[in-house]
Every structure is written in C-alpha cells, then in structure tokens.
Amino acid sequence: MFWSGETLKKRLPILVEPFATERVDCAAYTLAIGAELYVSPSDQSPEPTAVTIRTLTEGEAFTVPPGQFAFLVTQETVTVPDDAIAFMSIRTKVKFRGLVNVSGFHVDPGYRGQLTFAVFNSGPVPIHLKRGQPIFMMWYANLDRHTALKKGGAVEKGLNPEFIAAVAGEVQSFAGVTKKIDTVDKQLSERIHAIERDLGYYRVAAGFAMAVIAVVFATWVQNM
C-alpha cells in the first residue's frame, strides 16, 4: 500500500536529504529543481552543437522553449528502501502549462541519489522555472517483502552525460517549423509577385512592339 502523509513524516527524514516536513503533501512528498540543467537547443540558438549541461546558481531562473526537451535533477538525494518502491510525477499546475514528464515513472528498491526528470514542453509558450522550485511529486509504496532484487552501487549525482547525447543538437519545435514555413511562403509569394510584375512589363513591351510592327507594315503596304 502507499505510504500515508503520517508515514512519510516518520520515515522520510532518513530517506530524503534535505527533508522538510512542510513538503509532505497529503500522501506525497514534493521535490525541488536542483543545480544541474540541460535544455535542448532550438532554432533560435546560435550554436546548437555547443549547448551542454550547465549549473544554476541558487534561485536562478531558466526557460524550456516550446517543443524542446530538458533534463532536470532534483535538489534532494532520495533513498528507496528494499521493502518499498517509489513513483514520481510533476505537479499538476506545472503540467497544465504543458510540461510533460517523458522519463520513467518509478524508482527501484535500493536506489539512492538525485532523481533525473526528462521533460518536454508541449505547450505554445516558454515555461519559466527556477532552481529550488518545488515541482516534482514522489510517492512511496510497500512491497510484500524485503527484496534482494534491488539497485546498488554508488550514489547517483547530477546529470548523466549519456542522457544528453541522445537529444544533443537542434530540436525543431512546432513553432520553429511553422515560422520557417511562413518565411518560405512569404518568400515564394514575393517571388510570384515579382514574376507577375515582370510578365506585365513583357506584355506591355510586346504590345508596343506589335503596334510598331503593325504601323510599319501598314505604311509599307500603302507605299507599294
């Protein structure tokens, strides 16, 4: 069964670092955005291939442009005991702005470290966030026993560069594609108008030439 708010307050102080009682929200715990960040470059980025992981200062703001991916880490280090499993999501008020979690939705027994969220801005406008903002939700649920099939190894810290390699380089957003289509459409319309204008000049010139030829021919006929 899922842990209640009372159980979270009792057990999480040794499972979440740093822990804050006020972050217990009903049967979930709210996690905040940590220091490391990666946002995929858009068509507005001057050097898409140079965009990489960056470190945010305390409280520093950033945006996830429309149609772009981001990798975010939690500020907290979490531990999932071997008799439990955890589930994670994004707070509803942030999801309603278009930010979608496209990474995993559970944390295995035995895991310890910061959590990485891969998110996608499916909305039409940039989503503004900042370091330390509480936007992630985590639930714990009991397993039927302590399990030996669990995660182990070192504590996970920061963003894994292998995650970044999968989405490195410019990602074409719907807004960017639409803008490029509009630009091409405008250029094509201007070209068509220019061709029509030139054809108009050619028609006038051809009419004038025909008139001259007609006059010359009529004069020639009269003089025969």
Image (cartoon, helix red, strand yellow):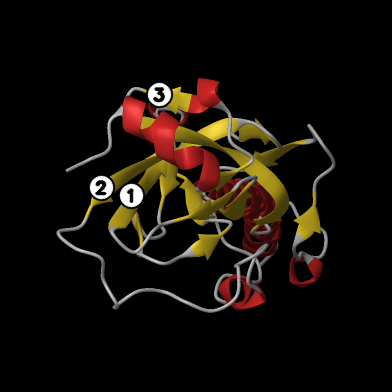
Q: Earlier in the sequence, mark 1 or mark 3?
A: 3
Res 93 visible: no
Disc 3 element: strand
Please name the residue shown 40% across and 56% down the image.
102
Q: Where does label 1 land, which residue?
A: 87
Pinpoint residue 105: horizontal percent, then vertical percent.
34, 54
Pinpoint residue 183: horizontal percent, then vertical percent.
62, 49
Disc 2 element: strand
Q: Earlier in the sequence, mark 2 or mark 3?
A: 3
Location of the N terminus by quadrant is top left
Q: Are the residues flagged by discs 1 and 2 in contact, CB closer than 8 Å?
A: yes
Q: In the shown orientation, is residue 57 left or right of residue 106?
A: right
Res 30 visible: yes
Under mark 3, the amino acid is Asp
Q: Where does label 2 land, which residue?
A: 141
Pinpoint residue 173: horizontal percent, then vertical percent.
53, 53
Location of the C terminus by quadrant is bottom right
Q: Where does label 3 land, which residue?
A: 25
Q: Nearer the viewer, residue 203 or 110?
A: 110
* Mark pair 1, 3: CA separation: 14 Å
Q: In the shown orientation, is residue 113 left or right of residue 148?
A: right
Under mark 2, the amino acid is Ala
Please name the residue shown 77% across and 64% down the image.
51
* Mark pair 1, 2: CA separation: 8 Å
